[in-house]
Amino acid sequence: MERIRTEATRIAGAYPFSHELAEGARYVGNQFDSLIRFLDNPLLPPDNNAAEGALRINALIRKNSLFFGSDAGGKNAAIALTILHSCKLAKVEPAAYLARVTPILLSHRLGRKQGLTGLTPLALAIDLAASATSPR
């Protein structure tokens, strides 16, 4: 990694300030600590492809659905996309997630107050994994 930093410094000095290679080399030098953070923490991915992929879907939908018809339509679309992305990240089937939480949410809305904690897709995935490994 130090060889990369040294080479970036060399390139930044070898080209004019506004040259694209110099700009890229300066970026590497300025962001070096952030760029190598994944080496210190094995839980961090070396790239942000998952985040960019999730955002790409939103941008595509936003482009294809320029007008939702109303502010409420846009808000509902954002909620639906959040649920879908959360299910995808937790590796939970969205239909199964909705089937599990909808009765709880309807019951809560009808005044039968019960705890709403643990209703995220990740919580459901953890719960399903625990029930699959527990002895019957």
Image: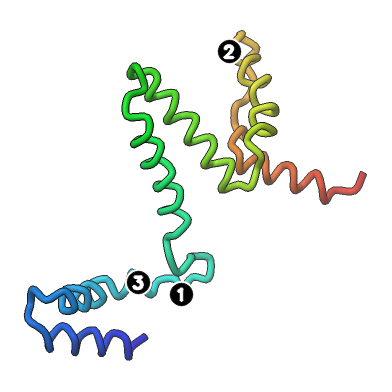
- Do the CB atoms of the residues marked 3 and 1 lie less than 8 Å apart? no
Q: Which residue is the extreme one toward the front? A: 64
Q: Residues within 10 Å of mark 2 (few under 14, many from 20)?
A: few
Left or right side of 1 for 90 = right
Left or right side of 74 for 115 = right
- The residue positioned 45% from the left and 52% from the top of the image is 53
User: In the rendered structure, which amino acid carries the disc numbered 2?
Assistant: Arg
Q: Which of the 4 quarters of the picture holds residue 112?
A: top right
The quadrant of the rendering that contains the N terminus is: bottom left
Q: Which residue is the extreme one toward the right? A: 136
Disc on the earlier residue, 3 or 2:
3
Residue 132 coordinates in the image, percent (x, y): 81, 47
Residue topped by disc 3 = 35
Q: Is residue 136 above or below residue 21?
A: above
Disc on the earlier residue, 3 or 1:
3
Q: Residues within 10 Å of mark 1 (few under 14, many from 20)?
A: few
Q: Is residue 47 above or below residue 66?
A: below
User: In the rendered structure, which amino acid carries the disc numbered 3?
Assistant: Leu
User: Which circle marks residue 40 in the picture?
Assistant: 1
User: In the rendered structure, which amino acid carries the disc numbered 1?
Assistant: Asp
Q: Nearer the viewer, mark 3 or mark 1?
A: 3
| Element type where label 1 sits in the image | helix
Q: Residues within 10 Å of mark 3 (few under 14, many from 20)?
A: few
Disc on the earlier residue, 2 or 1:
1
Estimate the spatial distance between the alpha carbons at disc 3 and disc 1, rounded to whole Å. 11 Å
- Do the CB atoms of the residues marked 3 and 2 lie less than 8 Å apart? no
User: Which circle marks residue 1 in the picture?
Assistant: none
Residue 34 coordinates in the image, percent (x, y): 33, 69
Q: Is residue 123 above or below residue 10?
A: above
User: Which circle marks residue 109 in the picture?
Assistant: 2
